[in-house]
Image (cartoon, grey):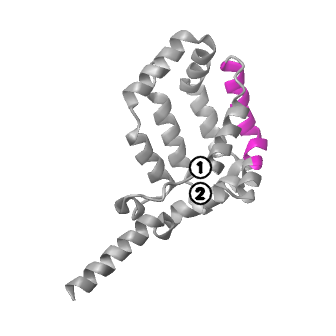
C-alpha cells in the first residue's frame, strides 16, 4: 500500500513538474492571452488611448528623444515569444500567477548589479540619464495614474484583468524596478 501511495505521489509530482500549465490556471491564462491576437487588439486600444499617448509623449520629450513606443512594442514581442521552462518547482506552481512569477523573477535578479549598471548608464549616457530622470519624476507617476483610471482605458484594462493580468501589481513592479537605480 505504501508503495502504491508513493508511486501516485511521485507520478503527480512528475506530471506537475513536466507540465506547469496543469496547476497555475491564472498564469496559463495570462500567458496564453499575451500570445493571442486578442491581446494584440487590446494592446492597440491601449496605445491609441490619449492618456497612454501622453505618457509616451512625456517620455519621448523628457527622455532625450528615446523612441519609447518601439521599446514597449519590443517588450510585447518578447513576451509573445517567451518560452517557459518545463521544470518549475511545485511550490511555485501551486501559487503562481503572472504577478507572482514576475515577483519571483525580480527576487532572483542581482539588484546591486542592476543598480551599478543603471548608475553607470546615467553617468555615461546623457540620453539615458534624461530618460531615467523622466521615469523617476513625479510627473511620470501622475501620468501613469491618470492613464490607469482613464475612461478610454477601462475596457482594455478590464480585458487584461479578466485574463489574470493585474495592471495595478504590474505598475507596482515597474515602479519598484525604476526605484532600484540611483537618485537623479
Badge 2 marks a residue whose secondary structure is helix
Where is residue 102 drawn, in percent x and y?
48, 47
- Magenta stretch: dominant SS? helix
Q: Residue at x 68, y 38 (%)?
A: 74
Going by the image, does 60 lie left or right of 138? right
- Label number found at residue 82: 1
Please tell me which residue lies in front, 146 or 64.
64
Q: Pointer 1: residues within 10 angstroms few (<14), some, or many (20+)?
A: few
Which is more N-terminal, label 2 or label 1?
2
Quarter of the N terminus within the rendering: bottom left
Relative to 99, say whether 108 is above or below.
Answer: above
Rendered location of residue 47, percent (x, y): 75, 42
Q: Is residue 43 visible?
A: yes
* Residue drawn where x is 57% and y is 32% of the image: 141
Q: Position of residue 107 (x, y in %)?
A: 38, 41
Asked if the magenta segment contains residue 62, the reply would be yes
- Tell me the residue at 48%/70% (across/down): 22
* 7 vs 56: above or below: below
- Disc 1 and disc 2 in contact, CB within 8 angstroms: yes
Outermost residue, bottom side: 1
**Mark 2, residue position:** 31
Give the image quarter of residue 163: bottom right
Q: Nearer the viewer, residue 10 or 176?
A: 10
Tell me where the magenta segment starts and ends, as one range: 44-63
Which residue is depicted at the point 48% across and 59% down? 86
Amino acid at each position: 500500500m505504501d508503495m502504491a501511495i508513493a508511486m501516485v505521489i511521485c507520478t503527480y509530482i512528475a506530471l506537475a513538474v513536466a507540465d506547469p500549465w496543469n496547476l497555475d490556471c491564472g498564469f496559463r491564462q495570462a500567458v496564453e492571452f499575451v500570445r493571442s491576437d486578442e491581446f494584440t487588439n487590446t494592446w492597440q486600444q491601449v496605445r491609441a488611448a490619449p492618456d497612454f499617448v501622453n505618457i509616451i509623449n512625456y517620455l519621448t520629450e523628457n527622455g532625450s528623444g528615446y523612441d519609447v513606443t518601439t521599446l514597449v512594442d519590443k517588450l510585447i514581442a518578447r513576451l509573445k515569444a517567451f518560452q517557459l521552462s518545463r521544470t518549475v518547482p511545485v511550490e511555485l506552481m501551486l501559487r503562481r500567477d503572472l504577478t507572482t512569477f514576475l515577483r519571483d523573477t525580480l527576487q532572483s535578479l542581482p539588484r546591486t548589479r542592476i543598480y551599478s549598471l543603471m548608475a553607470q548608464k546615467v553617468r555615461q549616457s546623457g540620453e539615458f540619464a534624461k530618460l531615467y530622470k523622466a521615469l523617476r519624476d513625479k510627473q511620470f507617476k501622475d501620468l501613469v495614474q491618470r492613464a490607469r483610471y482613464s475612461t478610454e482605458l477601462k475596457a482594455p484594462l478590464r480585458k487584461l484583468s479578466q485574463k489574470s493580468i493585474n495592471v495595478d501589481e504590474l505598475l507596482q513592479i515597474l515602479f519598484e524596478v525604476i526605484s532600484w537605480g540611483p537618485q537623479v
